[in-house]
Image (tube, helix red, strand yellow):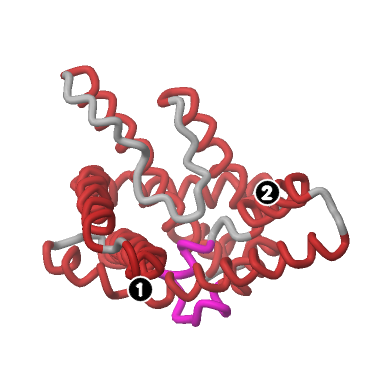
Amino acid sequence: MNLFEDILLVNKRTFKKSVKSFRNNWILIFTGIVYGFINMALTLLISTFFTGILSFLAGLVVAIASSSLISNYLYLLFNIINYDKITWADFKEGFKFFLWKVYGIFFIFWLGSFLLSAFVEVIGVNPQLLATIVTVLVIVGLNPLPETVYQKTLSSGESIGYALEFMKDNWINWLIPNVAFNILIYLLTNNWAIKMFSTHLNFNFDISIKGIIFYIFSQCLFSFMMIYRGHLFKLLSTSTPRKRMYISKFYD
């Protein structure tokens, strides 16, 4: 099987599974509203109680709360990709299921950023240029990190290593649909979805009929993309081109 045939096969199979999963789990599109209100409540809580001597704890609370929301979203995707359904029990359990793995990744990123800042000061490199280069490398090289977190039983550090290895082996099959999705989302919604652990597109609280319809449409695109990514990652991480060609003879 040549590369072009493999790309077509992978995306054909992924698309079919994604359509079915999205149809069965369309409720996912409304999680962004829930996360938005939780973030508002969290901001109010921190500004009210974490002042003065307690202000140094605010950063820790925000990091843990953000990790919890991401954990919740990833756990919902985990159930959609593996069981093709999500329940209220899944939603409640999700806040803690991947919490410490996600928090561990944030800590590693923070530590890396701290060391990079110290390195920049020593060698005198343009910090803005270096930050841009590192950001692009992280966005591309670790792009499948969310899927790695919820599909592979690995530690935080191991997840980062696995995502890099996955991209080395599957970068063409992974980037083509992801770039296409992001361009489509930007053209239709004027939003990019390149943030590492995005759980929803921005909600501007426009409660007009037009605003609500636009938000639902945007979330449909985003949710379908995340489901597509999940099925794509599962297929690519559990097969080789040779295996996919062999299986296609019997199931496609």
The quadrant in which residue 19 appears is: top left
Residue 72 appears left or right of 140: left
Magenta range is 145-159
Residue drawn at (68%, 49%) of the image:
136
Going by the image, does 185 lie left or right of 140? left
Label 2 neighbour load within 10 Å: few <14, some 14-19, many 20+: few
Q: Secondary structure at mark 2?
A: helix
Label 2 to label 1, Cα distance in Å? 25 Å
Rendering quarter of residue 243? bottom right
Mark number for residue 132? Answer: none
The amino acid at mark 2 is Val
Where in the figure is residue 82, as x and y percent of width and height?
32, 67
Q: Position of residue 171 (x, y in %)?
A: 67, 55
Work out whether residue 74 or residue 103 is closer to the camera in this orientation and state it.
103
Q: Is residue 146 left or right of residue 31?
A: right
Q: Would residue 190 be counted in the magenta stretch? A: no
- Upstream in sequence: badge 2 or badge 1: 1
Above or below: residue 110 compared with residue 12: below
Q: Secondary structure at mark 1?
A: loop
Which of the image's four quarters has the N terminus? Answer: bottom right
Disc number for residue 136? 2
Residue 98 versus residue 234 in the image, above or below: below
Residue of label 1: 98
Magenta stretch, main secondary structure class: helix
